Image (tube, grey):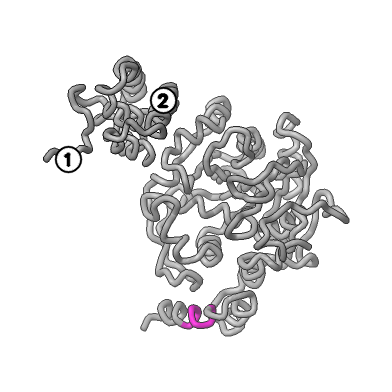
């Protein structure tokens, strides 16, 4: 989901309506049936957990769902899904695992 | 210089002038093998809606071909691009499920469904949102993501893209009977997307990226010809119950046609489907070229087992740049 990685990268442009609306749209997609896309939703939403109060509870719910979906990684045929899920279920103090620290 | 390399260089030079005439020259000079059989068979079946008795219609339609499926592994390749609510983009899941059950009823040992969507990386999402996942689960049919299947290198014998080889999914290469299941749609770059264009979806994303970039750069028409020469589909079940006209393959309008087209030759299938859409297949570049060596396009070499083509059709709307396709 390249759009979701772009949304994560727009964290410092949250004042723009298109970014706010995109985040709202994404938080309404927590019932996503695919582990791959749900992992991207979590990774993108995590970048916004300090700027909007409804993100943290949504993240908790999404992580619980994702953990159930990939409980047995042998049932997930696509290894990139397993890797993304591992990132998305990683330490909660990480805002954005793709962020380059300077 | 190897014979294969010289064939590619010579073929490439001839194809610079491209078109059916160049392909005919390639065949006449022995650089391209004429694979056409003496006759191809097509059956146009009537079915008004996806809620109809699709299993029965397909079993009866397939019986017309007297196929030997006993003990075979059948791979169904539907057209799954992405899910757009309300749009008729993908081969209908009920038709795919009915086809799977029909092949099993006619003696196939195993039926698999495989696809490698070109736009959407998340195949699981397309399957779930489009309804195919539920349909296959209910019928206990396994799905293979061809974008991420194990891949094998296959040398190319045709010169259209200039590539030495294609990387193809193991599931496609090891299946005994490959069935292309397109949806009848117009296409903003190729004119129409039918059973031959549908085989773009067997090209693995892990090798060619999304949306199969290398092949788009080499040219859609040329890629279609090389892919279909390397992976000839044994059979076609085309979803023409509701097609798409206008700005296909994603953003066109639904078009009720009420037909399913079965065929034992993808070229013959696409010629008949084009005519059902009110379009002239000989004006679709890759179809005109394919009819010179891959399969049959001329009416005298196509036997109709079901309904005949209607005398008149209301043509599918096309983008202005494809107005010349109208019959």
Mark 1 and mark 2 in contact? Answer it, CB < 8 Å.
Answer: no
Q: Residue at x 45, y 51 (%)?
A: B211
The chain ID associated with circle 1 is A
Look at the image and tell me in which quarter the C terminus of chain B lies: bottom right
How would you classify the magenta stretch by its main secondary structure? Answer: helix
Q: Residue at x 64, y 56 (%)?
A: B192
Image coordinates of residue B182 in percent, x first then y, are: 62, 48
Image coordinates of residue B268 in percent, x first then y, are: 70, 60
Which of the two labelled residues, at mark 1 and mark 2, occupies the earlier sequence position?
2
> In the structure shown, which secondary structural element does the residue marked by tag 1 occupy?
loop
Residues in magenta?
A: B10-15
Q: Which numbered tag is attached to residue A100?
A: 1
- Give the vertical position of B65 relative to A63 (above or below): below
Residue B232 visible in the shown view: yes
> In the structure shown, which secondary structural element does the residue marked by tag 2 occupy?
helix
Answer with left or right where residue A72 lies relative to residue B219: left
Distance from the alpha carbon under mark 1 to that under mark 2: 25 Å
Answer with left or right where residue B318 lies relative to residue B23: right
The chain ID associated with circle 2 is A
Image coordinates of residue B292 in percent, x first then y, are: 65, 72
Q: Which picture quadrant has residue B79?
A: top right
Q: Residue at x 77, y 44 (%)?
A: B257
Magenta stretch containing residue B145, yes or no? no
Q: Residues within 10 Å of mark 1 (few under 14, many from 20)?
A: few
Residue occupied by mark 2: A24
Answer with left or right where residue B25 lies relative to residue B313: left
**Are the residues under marks 1 and 2 on the same chain?**
yes
Q: Residue at x 41, y 61 (%)?
A: B214
């Amino acid at each position: 989901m390249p759009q979701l990685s772009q949304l994560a990268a727009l964290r410092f442009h949250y004042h723009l309506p298109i970014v706010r609306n995109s985040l709202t749209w994404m938080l309404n997609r927590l019932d996503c049936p695919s582990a791959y896309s749900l992992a991207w939703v979590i990774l993108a939403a995590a970048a916004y957990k300090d700027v909007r109060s409804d993100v943290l509870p949504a993240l908790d719910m999404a992580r619980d769902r994702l953990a159930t979906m990939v409980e047995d990684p042998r049932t997930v045929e696509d290894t990139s899904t397993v890797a993304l899920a591992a990132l998305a279920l990683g330490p909660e103090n990480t805002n954005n695992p793709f962020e380059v620290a300077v | 210089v190897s014979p294969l390399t010289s064939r590619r260089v010579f073929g490439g030079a001839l194809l610079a002038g491209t078109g059916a005439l160049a392909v005919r020259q390639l065949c006449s000079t022995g650089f391209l093998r004429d694979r056409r059989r003496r006759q191809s068979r097509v059956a146009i079946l009537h079915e008004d809606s996806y809620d109809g008795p699709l299993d029965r219609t397909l079993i009866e339609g397939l019986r017309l071909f007297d196929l030997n499926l006993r003990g075979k592994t059948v791979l169904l390749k539907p057209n799954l691009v992405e899910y757009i609510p309300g749009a008729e983009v993908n081969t209908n899941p009920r038709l795919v499920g009915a086809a799977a059950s029909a092949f099993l009823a006619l003696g196939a040992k195993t039926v698999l469904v495989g696809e490698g969507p070109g736009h959407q990386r998340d195949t699981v999402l397309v399957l779930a949102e489009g309804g195919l996942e539920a349909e296959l689960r209910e019928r206990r049919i396994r799905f293979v993501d061809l974008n991420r299947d194990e891949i094998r290198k296959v040398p190319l014998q045709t010169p259209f893209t200039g590539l030495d080889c294609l990387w193809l999914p193991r599931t496609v290469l090891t299946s005994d009977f490959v069935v292309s299941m397109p949806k009848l749609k117009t296409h903003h770059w190729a004119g129409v997307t039918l059973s031959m264009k549908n085989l773009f979806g067997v090209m693995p994303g892990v090798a060619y990226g999304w949306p199969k970039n290398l092949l788009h750069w080499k040219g859609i028409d040329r890629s279609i010809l090389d892919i279909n020469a390397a992976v000839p589909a044994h059979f076609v079940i085309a979803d023409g119950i509701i097609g798409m006209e206008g700005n296909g393959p994603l953003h066109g309008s639904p078009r009720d046609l009420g037909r399913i087209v079965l065929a034992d030759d993808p070229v013959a299938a696409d010629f008949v489907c084009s005519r059902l859409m009110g379009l002239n297949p000989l004006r679709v570049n890759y179809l005109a070229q394919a009819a010179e060596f891959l399969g049959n396009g001329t009416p005298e070499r196509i036997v109709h087992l079901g309904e005949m083509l209607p005398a008149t059709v209301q043509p599918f709307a096309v983008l202005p740049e494809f107005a010349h396709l109208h019959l």
